[in-house]
Amino acid sequence: MAVGVRAFGAGSGYSPLMNDSRPGIPADRYVERLAACREAVAACGFAALLIGVGPDLRYLTGFVGEPMERLTLLVIPVNGPVRFVVPHLEATKAAATPLVAAGVAEVVPFGETDDVAARVAALLGAAKPADPIGLSDRLWAMHVLQLQRALSARRFEPASTVLRDLRQVKDADEARLLRLAAQAADRTMDAIAAGPLVGRTEAEVGREIRGRLIDEGHDLADFAIVGSGPNGAAPHHDAGDRVIAAGEPVVLDLGGTLAGYVSDTTRTIWVAGEAWIAPEPEFRRVFDVVRAAQAAATAAVKPGVPAEQIDAAARRVIGAAGYGEYFTHRVGHGVGLETHEDPYMVSGNVTPLRPGMAFSVEPGIYLPGRWGVRLENIVICTDSGPEVLNHSSLDLRVVRG
């Protein structure tokens, strides 16, 4: 390892979740979320929301499930009782959710041969026919088509019209979980970036990343991008059989979920090898440009600033350095229960930043056939500016092994 390069590893004795072995969202928060959701349903002029398995359902109920051929729906009318329509085999699980336990939602189970779409239509019988029904964005087409046939006179719109504003501003409990996820990802990144890397395949390193994320407290390891040499020029490269060699950079982009909330961080390192092949001058220059762009975009985070200005701040730095055409993606995306969610830091998005919005800041430069550089942190907008959740070093790390 080079002189001046910090040694990173996992053997610090740190307990990944500290004294909290099961971090999560307090039960009463779900009741508050449902109340806010119902107010938004009325304000947006919807007759009801129909929320299927996915992040919207987890946000409102805490229910975690896999999308499947049996329909699961949280039925939220603008007025009247909230029903949790589930197949019989999921009824016990649904009954244990905070909304049902608090008595603010009722479980409505159905059998294997029941017409569940007709059952949902009956539950909405009193809703105003002229008002739209919001469907969760992740609902399978097969279920949407069944609901359309059963509710042929109704107009459907995305439920995100209602839920976007609620979900994109994180409360204190959500911010805490995002911090825990970021800390676990930082420890994973530091361990991987310390090496050894030379002679290993990208896929092998990717497997180690996933294992370390789980060991550090993640429930799921969602992705592990390992882009060595020319593969680093593909921002979403799939780690493959290429063997990492000395004298080249490696882009490491990793993340997963901890108590449902995501981590996502990227660092680019240089592998010098035993012969100590120093980083080439243009790589050092590009790395410095990307780091400056990352700093500029982060510094631009303030309440009231349009989301597109965060992207523009990074793009100005990269464009001024002559690499504008090689910055090929938006500078960031919202994070929470999903790795990609509102708000998006991209040209054309004039949504003003609000305290509690959490998103990535990840400028990159990608030179086809040569290599790429990307540096990514998760940031929360606060009243006083940016809170950076990732604290793994942004310095250029040069490793021997």
Image (cartoon, rainbow, N blue to C red):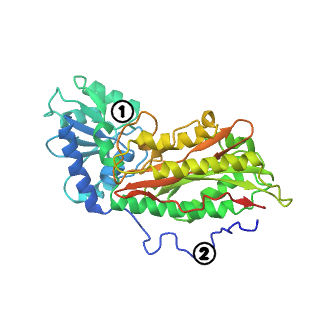
Q: Check if mark 2's residue and mark 1's residue have beta carbons within 8 Å.
A: no
User: Is residue 367 found left or right of 153 in the rendered image?
Assistant: right
- Dot 2 falls on a residue whose secondary structure is loop
The one nearer the camera, 19 or 270, is 270
Amino acid type, callout 2: Ser
Give the alpha-carbon distance from disc 2 to disc 1, as whole Å: 49 Å
In the image, what residue occupies the spot 40% across and 34% down?
140
In the image, what residue occupies the spot 42% across and 43% down?
341
Residue 266: x and y in percent read: 59, 52
In the rendered view, tell whether residue 368 sits above or below residue 226.
above
Amino acid type, callout 1: His
- Dot 1 falls on a residue whose secondary structure is helix
The answer to which quarter of the image holds residue 399 is: bottom right
Quadrant placement of the N terminus? bottom right
Q: Residues within 10 Å of mark 2 (few under 14, many from 20)?
A: few
The one nearer the camera, 343 or 24, is 343
Q: Please say whether residue 6 is visible from this viewpoint.
A: yes
Residue 211: x and y in percent read: 61, 60
In the image, what residue occupies the spot 70% across and 66% down?
5
| Label number found at residue 175 | none
Residue where numbered disc 1 is placed: 143
Residue 4: x and y in percent read: 71, 68
In the rendered view, tell whether residue 186 sits above or below residue 349.
below
The one nearer the camera, 222 or 227, is 227
The answer to which quarter of the image holds residue 368 is: top right
User: Is residue 129 found left or right of 310 in the rendered image?
Assistant: left
Q: Please say whether residue 244 is visible from this viewpoint.
A: no
In the image, what residue occupies the spot 60% across and 35% down?
324
Residue where numbered disc 2 is placed: 12
Q: Earlier in the sequence, mark 2 or mark 1?
A: 2
